[in-house]
Image (cartoon, helix red, strand yellow):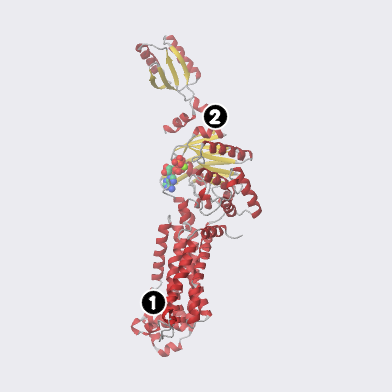
């Protein structure tokens, strides 16, 4: 289990990550979402020992990754958002090089390399020069490289950015295999729906601050309370009735915002639970407003993302 | 286990076309110089200067010193900055391989290539040995000196490479550093000695009474790090071709320096210089390992 507490990073005066807390359990794929500049890469680079944190702890199996960097390097595999490959080096040699940088013995190296090439579906490319591989293949190879020392935690910074849909699907299946092996996977993306499909839990950050952290289901639940109410009136309702509706809504203290999407369709942002929603409906019916449809819209994750990060 | 950085970089360098081109060019250039020098000799022209072989040798020495100092930074300045440009350095830094091992691996790999360059100068040197009256020890000493020179210049290149963001800037910085070091280490010869010391050295009796250890104590220790001093000592030891210029009193402190070198013995100076260059190389590789990681914290200019 990895538990991060109060992780903070200042670049000079600018605070890129602000007291971030999150927990990743064994065998869990944990998504990390946030808009550009939210501090995802910064957090991941700190965990990968490339940056020093200004404050905070990251405990994993009794080791503080931020303090004991030598141990941390053996426990963490890292795939950066942007990376290059060496020229004049074959795929198998590429992996062999990194394996030796991790001090892995010859026998283990050979076994590991063929297993990993198998895992990322590049076995038939073992003797091709890395430079000549396609971008998606390079990404898969880089994923293999980050697994070469059998780390407990795998950090992937936007790994799917250059992949076609098929490669993404393969990526998902690879990650599930890793999950079954009991590894923790920490994976960042801008695209919440894509992550929510493959992740067990999620963390959303914005401007370096934690917005949400928990399971994907918990996120949907939490978000539902914030979904807008849609009220559709009978077609052909006159404008006087519409004005009456708006007046009634305005009088309700729970209502925050009213927008008329089109004639006869109102979108209402309001707080409160289901009971207060019912209460409002009674009022409308008593006032003889011809309500045709009345429900909280279910929001998709893309909208959730916008909602959560938009008004910070 | 062998340093993986060294072996992998070496494999990649050997697979590229650049190094073989440099090697062939270097060997051809040296042999070409030999040929031009010996042309009149081979055509049977009566040569009044019997030490033509020795002179050619002196020329080759100087040329090789200059070329090595030019080539070494060019071969090393991409070592770490190049990985930065390629965006491969980070993946190296998260492995168990520490900064010092990375810097050392890069330096050792460059030394293998520079060793090959030095080796490619050997055919031309061998030709001079056949014609000019040079001993094997002298050639050997010269080769050792070249290696030390390449090591120091290469280490400066690796240091600049660790310091700078791009290969281009690293190349420029390493040449500037070499110039600066070469120049500042000459200063003792121009400003360093008091009137007393020069008086002692000019007085034939006092000079004769001076012992080698005493002379070594007078001699500025900075000179041991100055590649120019080593090169000069090599040439003087083997050819004596510059002696005429240095018998000149108005040269003052420069003449004093020369007299001290003469007293100490040119070959000993070369060996001390070799040691000095190696120490300087080690210092720069230590410094380099310090900067490999430091820069990554403030990475800028990402896509
Ligand atoms: N080396 C640096 N020096 C100064 N500020 C930096 C540095 N690196 C990042 N920042 C700032 O820290 C903040 C977080 O950046 P970070 O790269 O972690 O965001 P991100 O969530 O990965 O964004 P993206 O989705 O674009 O990859 C940004 O405001 C950025 O400008
Ligand atoms: Mg990022």
| Chain at numbered mark 1 | B
Residue lying at the far bottom of the rendered structure:
B205
Tell me whether marks 2 and 1 sit on the same chain. no
| In the foreground, A225 or A136 | A136
Q: What residue is drawn where x is 57% and y is 57%?
A: B4
Q: Is mark 1 within 8 Å of ligand 1?
A: no
Q: Position of residue A32 (x, y in %)?
A: 51, 38
Q: Which mark is residue A95?
A: none
Label 2 CB-ligand 1 distance < 8 A: no
Mark 2 neighbour class, 10 Å CA radius: few under 14, some 14 to 19, many 20 or more: some
**Residue that mark 1 sits on:** B189
Look at 42% across and 70% down and name the residue there: B66
Q: Is residue A15 visible?
A: no
Is there a contact, CB below 8 Å, between mark 2 and mark 1? no
Give the class, few, some or many, for how many residues have Cα within 10 Å of label 1's Cα (few <14, many ≥20).
some
Give coordinates of residue A173: x percent, y percent: 59, 37
Q: Which mark is residue A218?
A: 2
Name the quarter showing ligand 1. Answer: top left
Against B257, residue A96 (above or below) is above
SS under mark 1:
helix
Give whichever of A303, A23 is nearer the camera. A303
Q: Position of residue B290 (x, y in %)?
A: 49, 58
State the CA–CA distance, disc 2 to disc 1. Answer: 78 Å
Q: Chain of mark 2?
A: A
Residue at image point 38% right, 21% down: A259
Q: Quadrant of the N terminus of chain B?
A: bottom right
Vertical comparison of B79 with B217: above or below? above
Q: Quadrant of residue A198?
A: top right
Q: Measuring from the top left, give residue B10's x and y in whole percent.
A: 54, 60
Q: Is residue B26 left or right of residue A1?
A: left
Residue B53 in sight: yes
């Amino acid at each position: 289990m990895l538990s991060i507490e109060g992780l903070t990073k200042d670049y000079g005066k600018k605070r890129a990550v602000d007291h971030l807390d999150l927990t990743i359990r064994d065998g869990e794929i944990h998504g990390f979402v946030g808009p550009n500049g939210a501090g995802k890469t910064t957090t991941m680079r700190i965990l990968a020992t490339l940056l020093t944190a200004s404050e905070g702890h990251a405990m994993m199996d009794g080791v503080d990754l931020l303090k004991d960097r030598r141990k941390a390097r053996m426990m963490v595999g890292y795939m950066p958002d942007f990376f290059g490959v060496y020229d004049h080096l074959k795929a198998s040699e590429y992996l062999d090089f990194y394996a030796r940088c991790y001090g892995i013995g010859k026998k283990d190296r050979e076994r590991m390399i063929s297993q990993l090439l198998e895992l990322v579906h590049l076995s038939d490319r073992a003797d091709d020069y890395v430079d000549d591989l396609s971008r998606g293949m390079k990404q898969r190879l880089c994923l293999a490289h980050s697994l070469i020392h059998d780390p407990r935690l795998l950090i992937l910074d936007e790994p799917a950015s250059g992949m076609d849909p098929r490669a993404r699907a393969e990526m998902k299946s690879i990650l599930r295999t890793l999950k079954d092996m009991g590894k923790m996977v920490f994976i960042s993306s801008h695209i919440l729906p894509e992550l929510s499909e493959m992740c067990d839990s999620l963390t959303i950050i914005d401007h370096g601050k934690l917005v949400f952290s928990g399971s994907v289901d918990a996120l949907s639940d939490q978000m539902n309370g914030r979904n807008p109410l849609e009220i559709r009136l009978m077609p052909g309702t006159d404008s006087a009735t519409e004005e009456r509706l708006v007046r009634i809504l305005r009088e309700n203290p729970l209502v925050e915002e009213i927008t008329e999407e089109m004639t006869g369709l109102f979108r209402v942002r309001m707080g409160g639970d289901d009971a207060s929603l019912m209460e409002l409906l009674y009022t409308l019916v008593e006032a003889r407003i011809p309500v045709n449809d009345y429900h909280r819209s279910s929001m998709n994750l893309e909208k959730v993302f916008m909602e959560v990060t938009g008004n910070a | 286990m062998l340093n993986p950085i060294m072996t992998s970089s070496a494999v990649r360098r050997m697979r590229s076309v650049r190094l073989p081109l440099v090697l062939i060019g270097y060997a051809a250039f040296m042999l070409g110089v030999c040929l031009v020098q010996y042309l009149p000799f081979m055509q049977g022209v009566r040569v009044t200067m019997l030490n033509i072989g020795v002179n050619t040798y002196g020329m080759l020495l100087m040329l090789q010193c200059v070329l090595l100092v030019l080539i070494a930074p060019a071969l090393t300045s991409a070592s770490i900055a190049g990985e930065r440009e390629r965006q491969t350095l980070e993946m190296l830094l998260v492995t168990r391989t520490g900064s010092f091992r990375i810097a050392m691996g890069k330096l050792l790999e460059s030394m293998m290539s520079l060793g090959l360059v030095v080796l490619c100068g050997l055919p031309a040197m061998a030709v001079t040995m056949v014609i000019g009256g040079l001993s094997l020890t002298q050639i050997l000493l010269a080769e050792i000196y070249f290696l030390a020179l390449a090591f120091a210049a290469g280490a400066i290149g690796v240091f600049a490479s660790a310091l700078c963001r791009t290969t281009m800037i690293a190349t420029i910085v390493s040449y500037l550093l070499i110039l600066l070091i070469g120049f500042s280490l000459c200063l003792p010869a121009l400003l360093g000695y008091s009137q007393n010391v020069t008086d002692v050295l000019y007085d034939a009796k006092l000079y004769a009474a001076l012992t080698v250890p005493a002379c070594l104590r007078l001699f500025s220790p900075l000179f041991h790090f100055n590649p120019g001093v080593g090169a000069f000592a090599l040439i003087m030891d083997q050819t004596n071709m510059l002696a005429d210029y240095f018998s000149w009193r108005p040269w003052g402190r420069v003449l004093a320096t020369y007299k001290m070198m003469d007293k100490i013995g040119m070959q000993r100076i070369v060996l001390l210089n070799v040691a000095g260059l190696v120490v300087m190389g080690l210092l720069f590789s230590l410094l380099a390992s310090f900067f490999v990681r430091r820069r990554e914290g403030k990475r800028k200019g990402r896509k």
